[in-house]
Structure formats: C-alpha cells, structure tokens
Amino acid sequence: MGGIVGLLGAGLLAAGPALAHPHVWIDTRIEVILDAENQATGLRISWTYDDLYSLYIIGDKGLDPDWDGALTPEEVAGLAGFDMAWDEGFAGDTYALTGDRALALSRPVEWTAGYAGGKISSTHLRLFDVPVPVDAVPLVVQVYDPGYYVAYAIPFDPVVTGGVGCSAQVFVPDLDAADEALKAALSEYTPDIDLEAEFPAIGAAYAEEVRVTCAAP
C-alpha cells in the first residue's frame, strides 16, 4: 500500500464493502505557474478532503479534543505535511503531459495545511525538471489515483500565474464510458481474488484534467 492510499491509513479499508471504491473524495485546485516566455515552471496543487476523511485524520492525530470544529494555531501546525510523506516513485496522483509526452515533476515542496468548515485542505508545489513551452499544443494536467481508492475532482476554475495570452479549462471524462471500463476490468477477476487488495488500475478512466494553452506571441 503506497502513495496517498498508504498515507490514508488501513483504518479506512474496513469502512465498507470491498467494492466500495472510491473510499476518499478530494476536490483539487490547480495553479499553473508560467514564466515570461510562456513556459510552465511548476504546479501548485491544493487538495480539500471530504468531511469523513477529514474527521478521521483529526481524530487520529488527537486534534480538536473538545470537538468544537475549530483548531488552535498549534493544532493546525500539527497538520502540516501529514499527506506529504510520499513513497519513492509515487506520482502524487498528478500527471502532466504535452502532446503524448509525459513530463517529470519534482517531489512536493512548500506544503501547507489548514482546517475549515469541517474539512482539511493542503497545498504543495511541484516543479518541472525543465521549463515546458506552452502554446497551441496544450499543457495537460490530470488528477487521478490509478487504483481509484481516491476520487479526485476539479470543481474550481484553474489559475494561470504569469505568462501572456494564456488560458486554462477543465475537462471531465465520459463517466458512462469509465463505468463500462470498470465493469469490464472487474469481470476479469475470479471470486478468489481480494479485490480490495488488487483493485484494477482504472483510475485514469475517471481523470479530470486542466488544459492550458497560450496564444502565439
């Protein structure tokens, strides 16, 4: 169990039936950082966890002992980095592409965390190995958990910081087609397989994405 799944803790695995995927829901904000030459230099990602998982983390860490829904500054500080101890090779459930070329991203830096309205939010910055030119060929940023334990959505308008003549749009997948792909993948399994431990890597079919383009200078 690695990546975000490992960070979420085994306690949630017993929270429902084996096929109750996903288990956790995360609303994602994406900021694409561009330089003056319309080259992408990094992504700032914000995750807002669902109420149930937020409650699980607050309780697991012993925060908000009076259960008044508010954290002291010291308790908020105790949240910082709770979801940033990534396994080696974990992609952060964030994938960047230009054309059909996958782009390398750094491990997370500059992370923060907060708690409001019963939900935990965290942010982190990831940098491209080299600046990525953005023009009529879009820079695509996808968010998904390959094992579909976590369901990511992008309900917020993406932000483009820097650059000239650039815009960003959110695109959502064909959920009916994704559901059919999931059914087809599950049909391959025999009854003796532990689906919770070996759930098919179907998350990409449910991936929402941001596409960034820039006009020619």
Image (tube, rainbow, N blue to C red):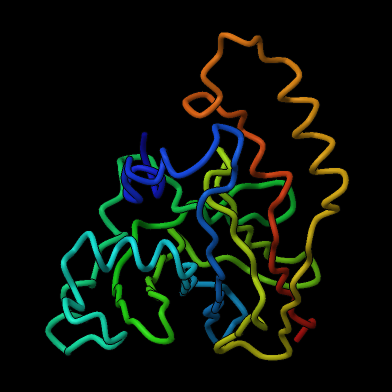
Is residue 132 shown left or right of residue 214? left
Q: Give whichever of 108, 66 is nearer the camera.
A: 66
Residue shown at 74%/66% (left/top)? 138
Image quarter in which the N terminus is found? top left
Quarter-wise, where is residue 203 in the image? top right
- Residue 87, compared with residue 136, is above or below; it is above
Residue shown at 33%/40% (left/top)? 10
* Residue 143, percent from left and from top: 59, 58
Image quarter in which the C terminus is found? bottom right
- Residue 99, compared with residue 118, is above or below; it is above
* Residue 33, percent from left and from top: 52, 79
Most extreme residue toward the left is 74
* Residue 17, percent from left and from top: 55, 36
Is residue 108 shown left or right of residue 52? left
Quarter-wise, where is residue 64 in the image? bottom left
* Residue 204, percent from left and from top: 67, 44
- Residue 94, compared with residue 74, is above or below; it is above
Residue shown at 38%/74% (left/top)? 120
Quarter-wise, where is residue 216 in the image? bottom right
Q: Is residue 42 visible?
A: no
Q: Give whichever of 169, 196 is nearer the camera.
A: 196
Q: Is residue 46 visible?
A: yes
Residue shown at 25%/80% (left/top)? 67
How many tags in the picture? 0
